[in-house]
Image (spheres, rainbow, N blue to C red):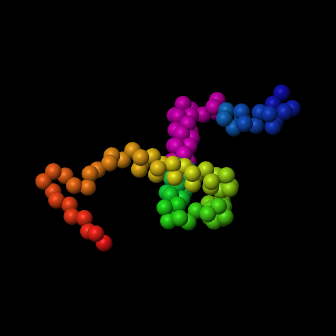
Amino acid sequence: MEEAFPEFFADRNARDTRSRSPEQEISAESDFVCRSAFETVLSMLVSINHYLRFIYDWSNEMTSIKWCEQKFNLSENTVIDRNNYFREVCAMAIENKPQRKICGSGKIEEIDES
């Protein structure tokens, strides 16, 4: 049957473990896990780097839609969503920050009339 449909069984043949020893199987499996974990971490780092760069540029008011489309290869909607998200985060941080009094007990504040 495999001879009649080689493309159907191709992946299965590549993973055929009958010819591998248990040690080879464990090694191959851990190789796959390590590569997969490394690729995941690498993509996360790229993603983190991407976000940090976007946040830095946003804080310097450099995130126009056209500029972000070119620099980050983002769609217009994504740029708008990210800009709105960062504005909301900043607004929440300001709203949640406890209000402090200018002066405390035992301190004298001078107010200039100019």
Q: Nearer the viewer, residue 51 or 88?
A: 88
Residue 12: x %, y % from top left: 71, 33
Residue at the image point whose x is 53% and y is 64% from the top: 61
Which quadrant of the figure has residue 69?
A: bottom right
Residue at the image point whose x is 46% and y is 51% from the top: 90
Residue at the image point whose x is 68% and y is 55% from the top: 75
Residue at the image point whose x is 63% and y is 31% from the top: 17
Q: In this rendering, would 18 be left or right of 6? A: left
Q: Quadrant of the C terminus?
A: bottom left
Q: Is residue 15 above or below residue 86?
A: above
Question: Does the magenta segment cover residue 26?
Answer: yes
Q: Quadrant of the N terminus?
A: top right
Q: Is residue 106 above or below residue 57?
A: above
- Visible in this render: residue 42? no
Q: Nearer the viewer, residue 55 or 45?
A: 55
The outermost residue toward the front is 113
The outermost residue toward the left is 106
Q: Which residues are magenta?
A: 17-41
- Visible in this render: residue 33? yes
Residue 9: x %, y % from top left: 77, 33
Q: Nearer the viewer, residue 87 or 28?
A: 87
The outermost residue toward the bottom is 114
Q: Is residue 18 above or below residue 80?
A: above
Count all numbered tags in the image, as a single digit. Answer: 0
The chief SS type of the magenta part is helix
Q: In this rendering, would 100 be left or right of 91? A: left
Residue 100: x %, y % from top left: 29, 50
Q: In this rendering, would 59 be left or right of 16? A: left
The outermost residue toward the top is 1
